[in-house]
Image (tube, rainbow, N blue to C red):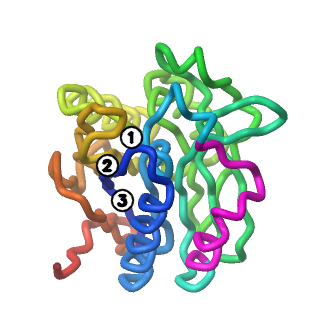
Amino acid sequence: MIIASAQTRPTRFDINKNLLAHYRLIELAGKNGANLLLFPELSISGYERERAGEFAFEPNDKRLDKLRRLSAKNQIVVVAGAPFLMANNLYIGAFIIQPDETISVYTKQFLHGEENNYFAASADYNPQIRIKNEQFSLAICADINNPQHPENAKKMGATIYMAGIFFEPHEMTKAHLILSGYAKTQSINVLMSNFAGCPYGLSGGGKSAFWNKKGELVASLNGSEQGILFIEKKGENWKEKIIPR
């Protein structure tokens, strides 16, 4: 099994350009055998609060159609984020796009700061992903600040905890400590995807990474590069898969 974390640099207020970047990365991940590709928080829209409603996606949004087709073509599960409008509530959502072209949505459960002025939080939308013998449970950014969140994932049977985040450079030491800690205390593998670049006029800290269930860092991207981190399971162990540039 191969899983992958995309580290992207979104363009503010340009959904179409951001989708094009998603298409390219999905094709790249598929060509290199990935079974799943995780994008950062609000990867399609870029991290936006005040104007999030303008970029909101609905459950059967036509703008997701090509992502569906690419998921099917490459036989890859894609997890990509956007503001999600459901029953007149706006959520920070992550679309889970399956190779059979079905879509489910995870919604952020724990909001941070001014997000509360623009979004609703909900634990009602929390689908699990099953690929071969692994179960994936999702988190979005500030969800990882609550230890109950990975604990619940473990109780639900997750073997891999995935976090799509937007953390700035000065927050990355903290993020790595939190996620490596959860990997060790919950005995769960952890995959993280973060922005590189300037969503919302701030710098993303990059350093997308994977930790094994002992809390050991298996591999990490640097703080500024765009690209994909590939992780491959060999027997019972996870290793970085080096892709020729």
Q: Quadrant of the N terminus?
A: bottom left
Residue 234 visible within the image: yes
Q: Label for residue 183? A: 1
Q: Nearer the viewer, mark 3 or mark 1?
A: 3
Residue 59: within the magenta? yes
Amino acid type, residue under disc 3 in the picture? Ala
The residue beneath circle 3 is 6
Which residue is drawn at the image coordinates 18% and 26% (left, top)?
A: 170
Identify the element where label 1 is drawn.
helix
Identify the element where label 2 is drawn.
strand
Q: Nearer the viewer, mark 3 or mark 2?
A: 3
Q: Percent x, y for residue 237?
A: 34, 65
209 or 71: nearer the viewer: 71
Amino acid type, residue under disc 1 in the picture? Ala
Q: Are marks 2 and 1 in contact (CB under 8 Å)?
A: yes
- Position of 224 compared to 79: left or right? left
Q: Which mark is first along the chain, 1 or 2?
A: 1
Q: Which mark is first along the chain, 2 or 3?
A: 3
State which region is magenta.
55-71
Answer with the quarter of the image where residue 133 lies: bottom right
- Per the model, the C-alpha gap separating discs 2 and 1 is 7 Å
Figure check: 219 above or below 240: above
Q: Which mark is first along the chain, 1 or 3?
A: 3
Residue 1 visible within the image: no
Amino acid type, residue under disc 2 in the picture? Trp
